[in-house]
C-alpha cells in the first residue's frame, strides 16, 4: 500500500525502503530542517559539515536511555545533510536527540564525539525545562520534542503600528507577575502577562518587548549567595533558538509547546498591542572551553563559533563564546529562526542583544556591509517586522549612530540615555546636547540615510538602574550577586538626591518623584520611539542593584503595591502617553503650521534663564487644525523664567503637564480648571518640566484655519 505526503514542492508517494532497528524508513525531505510530523510518520533532517556519521536516538518521555538508535545509512546523506523519514512514529510517543561521529582536534576547532548526545539545533521544543528552578537530575541531557503546529489564529488582527507611533514597554515574563501583589491566577507565566493586558491598555503602551523567551536553563551557574539562591534569571544564555521557554507556561504543553505564548501574542494583537522579542544571537549557553557541548559544538564547533587560530573562543559577548553570525551556515540558521518566529508566532519585532557582534567577520573584525544584517534588512518575510539593534558589544565595538542599517534597522539610542541622564540630574550646561537628543538625534541619524525612525529612546531598561533607583542611588549595590560588587556598570549617571537609598526625608522623596516625572516627560516628548522599563510607571525599585540578572526574587519581581503607593506617578505617565498620542507633531513631521512656526523650534538657555524649551508645530492628523506643543525643562536648582515664542493674539499657552505641581496639582490638568498663561512667560520651579499647548483663547482648543481667517 502506498502512502503519500505533501511538502513545499508537491505530493510524493512515500513507501519504506529500509528497516532499521525494527522501524521502516526511507530517505527524507532534505530541505526541511529539524523534525516534522508528516502523514506517514516523522521526518528528521540535520546537517553537519564535519561529521562522518549520524545516529538518531529515540527516547520515551522523561527517560534518558534510548529505546531505539537509528543510524543514518550513508546513502541517506546528500552533501552535508542527513535526512530520514521514520514510518509509524507518533509525535506524542517519543523524544529525540542525535549522536555524531567525526574528527576530534580542538586546536582546529573540531569537537566531534560519537558518545556525545546532541540537541537538534532546529528543535521546536526542548524537554526537561518545564518546572522553573528545578535542577535536572545528574547525567540528564537535552532532548527535543516534535511540535504539532496547528494553532488557530482565527481573525487575529495585525496591528502594523508605525515605528514613530509606538510606546514600547520592556518586561520580564516571570518578573512581571511573579510577586504575590500581582493578583494574577498564573504568576510568572505567559498567561500571567495576558491577565495584565487591561492594565497595559489603561497605561497606553502599544508594544511590549519581552526579555528572552527562547529556551534557556535558569539553573545554569545556580549558587547560593548570602543565604539566597541566585540563578540565570534574565535568560540571556540561549539553549535553543527555535524553542519557547517552557518554564514560562502555566501548565505542560506536551507537543503543543508555544501555544500559551501564541495565545498571549494573539490577545495582545486583539488589543492593539504589538509584541517584540529580545533575541540573543551573539552567544549560546555552551560557554567557552570549559563549557558543555550539548548542541552547536557537537554539530560543527568551528562553524558556529568564532575561534582563534589555535581553536579557542573569541569572547566579544562577555559570556564565553561568540556566535559566528556571518558564516553562511549560521547566517541561514538565524534567518530561518526569525522567519519561524514571525510566521508561526506572529512576532512584530526583534530587539537584538549586543547586535554589533552580528556585524563582525569570522575573525572578529567589524564588517562594512555585514551579510547577515543586510539579509535581515531585505528579507521579504521580515518586511513588516521591526528590527532594533543594541548597537554595541562587550568587545568594545560601539556603533550607536553608525550601525549598518540600509534605512531599515533602528537602534537603542545609548547616547540618548547617557546625555539625557546627565542633563536631567542637573548638568544644565548640556542643554544643546539635550536639544539634539530630544528632537531626534539628527546628529547621529541623518534622515537621508537612516530615515526618521532610527532612534529608540530610553533612559532605563533591564540593564541598569530602574527610574526610581536612578534618583535614589549614586552607586550600584550588587553585593547579593556574589561578585563583590564588581559586576554591573559603574557609569550610571545617577544621583541619590542627597541620601543613598531609602530615606524618610520628605523633601528628598519629593525631589526624587519630581525628577522621575521630569525623566518620563522628556522621554515621551522626544522625537523617536520611546521605550521604558516595566514598573517605572509606578516607581518600582531594585534596591540599587543595576545588574539583577541572577535575582529571581523581590529584587527583580515587580511589586504591584507600588502602583497603589505611587498612583500619582502612574496617572502622570498615563497622561503623558495619551498626550504624546494626541499630538502628531511630537512624533513626526506633520505639515506646516499655518501661522509660520517652524516644525521644531529650540529656545536655548541664555543669560536670562537656564530653561531649555522645544516647540513642535504642524497640523493635526486630519489636517483641520494647527497643532503646537512645547516642552520646557528647568534642570537648575532654583526657580527660572521660561520664555515661549510669541503666538498670534488668538492663541493662549495652556499648561498640559507640570512636574513642579505649582500650576497643576498632580501634574496633569483638571478639565474643569484649565491653566492658561497670560502672555509668553512663566516661572518654572526648581528641577521641573512643563508641557504646554497653544490653544484658541476663545474656544480653548487647537486653532483651526477657520478661526485664523475669522
Image (cartoon, helix red, strand yellow):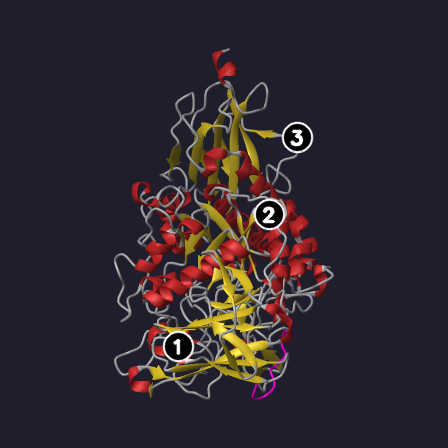
- The tally of labels here is 3
Task: Pinpoint residue 524: horizontal percent, then vertical percent.
Answer: 51, 44
Badge number at residue 673: 3
Label 1 vs label 2, nearer the camera? 1
Q: Quadrant of residue 502?
A: bottom right
Q: Secondary structure at mark 3?
A: loop
Q: Secondary structure at mark 2?
A: helix
Label 3 vs label 1, nearer the camera? 1
Query: Compared to 26, does 403 lie above or below?
Result: above
Q: Main secondary structure of the magenta part?
A: loop
The quadrant the N terminus occupies is bottom right
Please state if 576 lies on the left or on the right of 522 as rendered.
right
Please state if 135 lies on the left or on the right of 313 as rendered.
right
Residue found at x 64% / y 78%: 61
Toward the viewer: 577 or 541? 577
Toward the viewer: 190 or 347? 347
Please state if 98 lies on the left or on the right of 93 as rendered.
left
Task: Pinpoint residue 171: horizontal percent, then vertical percent.
Answer: 57, 59
For mark 2, does the 10 Å Cα neighbourhood hold few (<14), some (14 to 19), or many (20 or more) residues? Answer: many
- Asked if the magenta segment contains residue 299, the reply would be no
Task: Pinpoint residue 310: horizontal percent, then vertical percent.
Answer: 27, 83
The residue range painted magenta reads 131-140
Label 2 vs label 3, nearer the camera? 2
For mark 1, does the 10 Å Cα neighbourhood hold few (<14), some (14 to 19), or many (20 or more) residues? Answer: few
Badge number at residue 269: 2
Residue found at x 56% / y 42%: 576
Q: Secondary structure at mark 1?
A: helix
What is the spatial separation of the Cα atoms under label 3 and label 1, in whole angstroms? 83 Å
For mark 3, does the 10 Å Cα neighbourhood hold few (<14), some (14 to 19), or many (20 or more) residues? Answer: few
Residue picked out by circle 1: 75
Amino acid at each position: 500500500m502506498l502512502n503519500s505526503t505533501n511538502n513545499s514542492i508537491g505530493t510524493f508517494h512515500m513507501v519504506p525502503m529500509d528497516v532499521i532497528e525494527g522501524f521502516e524508513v526511507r530517505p527524507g525531505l532534505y530541505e526541511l530542517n529539524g523534525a516534522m510530523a508528516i502523514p506517514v510518520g516523522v521526518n528528521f533532517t540535520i546537517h553537519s559539515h564535519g561529521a562522518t556519521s549520524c545516529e538518531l536516538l529515540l527516547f520515551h518521555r522523561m527517560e534518558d536511555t534510548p529505546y531505539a538508535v537509528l543510524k543514518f545509512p550513508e546513502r541517506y546523506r546528500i552533501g552535508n545533510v542527513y535526512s530520514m523519514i521514520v514510518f509509524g512514529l507518533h509525535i506524542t510517543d517519543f523524544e529525540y536527540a542525535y549522536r555524531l561521529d567525526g574528527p576530534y582536534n580542538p586546536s582546529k576547532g573540531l569537537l566531534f564525539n560519537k558518545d556525545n548526545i546532541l540537541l537538534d539545533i532546529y528543535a521546536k521544543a526542548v524537554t526537561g525545562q518545564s518546572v522553573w528552578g528545578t535542577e535536572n537530575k545528574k547525567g540528564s541531557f537535552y532532548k527535543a520534542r516534535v511540535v504539532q503546529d496547528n494553532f488557530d489564529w482565527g481573525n487575529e488582527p495585525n496591528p502594523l503600528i508605525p515605528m514613530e507611533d509606538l510606546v514600547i514597554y520592556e518586561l520580564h515574563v516571570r518578573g512581571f507577575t511573579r510577586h504575590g501583589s500581582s493578583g494574577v491566577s498564573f504568576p510568572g507565566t505567559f498567561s500571567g502577562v495576558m491577565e495584565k493586558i487591561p492594565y497595559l491598555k489603561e497605561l497606553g503602551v502599544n508594544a511590549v518587548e519581552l526579555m528572552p523567551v527562547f529556551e534557556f536553563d535558569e539553573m545554569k551557574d545556580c549558587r547560593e549567595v548570602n543565604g539566597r539562591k541566585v540563578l540565570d534569571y534574565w535568560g540571556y544564555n540561549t539553549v535553543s533558538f527555535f524553542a519557547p521557554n517552557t518554564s514560562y507556561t502555566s501548565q505542560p504543553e506536551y507537543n503543543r509547546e508555544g501555544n500559551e505564548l501564541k495565545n498571549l501574542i494573539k490577545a495582545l494583537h486583539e488589543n492593539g498591542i504589538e509584541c517584540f522579542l529580545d533575541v540573543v544571537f551573539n552567544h549560546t549557553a555552551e560557554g567557552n572551553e570549559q563549557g558543555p557541548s550539548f548542541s552547536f559544538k557537537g554539530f560543527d564547533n568551528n562553524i558556529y563559533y568564532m575561534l582563534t587560530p589555535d581553536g579557542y573562543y573569541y569572547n566579544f559577548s562577555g559570556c564565553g563564546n561568540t556566535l559566528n553570525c556571518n558564516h553562511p551556515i549560521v547566517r541561514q540558521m538565524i534567518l530561518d529562526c526569525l522567519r519561524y518566529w514571525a510566521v508561526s508566532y506572529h512576532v512584530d519585532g526583534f530587539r537584538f542583544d549586543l547586535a554589533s557582534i552580528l556585524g563582525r567577520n569570522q575573525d572578529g573584525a567589524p564588517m562594512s556591509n555585514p551579510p547577515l544584517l543586510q539579509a535581515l534588512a531585505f528579507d521579504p518575510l521580515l518586511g513588516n517586522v521591526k528590527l532594533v539593534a543594541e548597537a554595541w558589544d562587550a568587545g568594545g565595538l560601539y556603533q550607536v549612530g553608525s550601525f549598518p542599517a540600509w534605512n531599515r534597522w533602528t537602534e537603542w539610542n545609548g547616547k540618548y540615555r547617557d546625555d539625557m541622564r546627565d542633563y536631567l540630574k542637573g548638568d544644565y550646561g548640556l542643554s544643546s546636547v539635550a536639544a539634539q537628543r530630544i528632537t531626534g538625534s539628527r546628529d547621529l541619524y541623518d534622515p537621508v540615510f537612516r530615515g526618521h525612525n532610527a532612534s529608540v529612546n530610553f533612559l532605563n531598561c533591564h540593564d541598569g538602574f530602574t527610574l526610581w533607583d536612578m534618583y535614589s542611588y549614586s552607586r550600584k549595590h550588587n553585593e547579593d550577586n556574589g561578585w563583590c560588587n564588581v559586576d554591573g556598570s559603574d557609569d550610571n549617571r545617577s544621583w541619590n538626591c542627597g541620601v543613598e537609598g531609602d530615606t524618610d526625608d520628605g523633601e528628598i522623596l519629593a525631589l526624587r518623584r519630581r525628577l522621575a516625572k521630569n525623566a518620563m516627560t522628556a522621554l515621551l516628548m522626544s522625537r523617536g520611539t520611546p521605550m521604558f522599563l516595566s514598573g517605572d510607571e509606578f516607581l518600582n525599585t531594585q534596591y540599587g542593584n543595576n545588574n539583577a540578572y541572577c535575582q529571581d526574587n523581590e529584587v527583580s519581581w515587580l511589586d504591584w503595591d507600588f502602583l497603589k503607593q505611587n498612583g500619582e506617578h502612574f496617572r502622570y505617565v498615563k497622561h503623558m502617553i495619551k498626550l504624546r498620542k494626541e499630538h502628531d507633531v511630537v512624533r513626526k513631521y506633520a505639515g506646516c503650521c499655518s501661522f509660520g512656526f517652524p516644525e521644531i523650534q529650540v529656545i536655548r538657555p541664555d543669560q536670562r534663564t537656564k530653561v531649555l524649551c522645544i516647540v513642535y508645530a504642524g497640523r493635526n492628523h486630519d489636517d483641520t487644525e494647527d497643532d503646537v506643543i512645547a516642552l520646557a525643562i528647568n534642570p537648575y536648582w532654583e526657580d527660572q523664567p521660561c520664555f515661549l515664542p510669541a503666538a498670534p493674539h488668538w492663541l493662549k499657552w495652556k499648561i498640559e503637564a507640570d512636574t513642579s505641581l505649582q500650576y497643576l496639582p498632580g501634574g496633569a490638568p483638571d478639565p474643569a480648571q484649565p491653566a492658561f498663561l497670560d502672555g509668553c512667560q512663566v516661572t518654572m520651579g526648581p528641577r521641573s518640566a512643563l508641557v504646554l499647548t497653544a490653544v484658541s483663547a476663545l474656544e480653548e482648543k487647537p486653532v483651526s484655519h477657520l478661526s485664523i481667517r475669522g
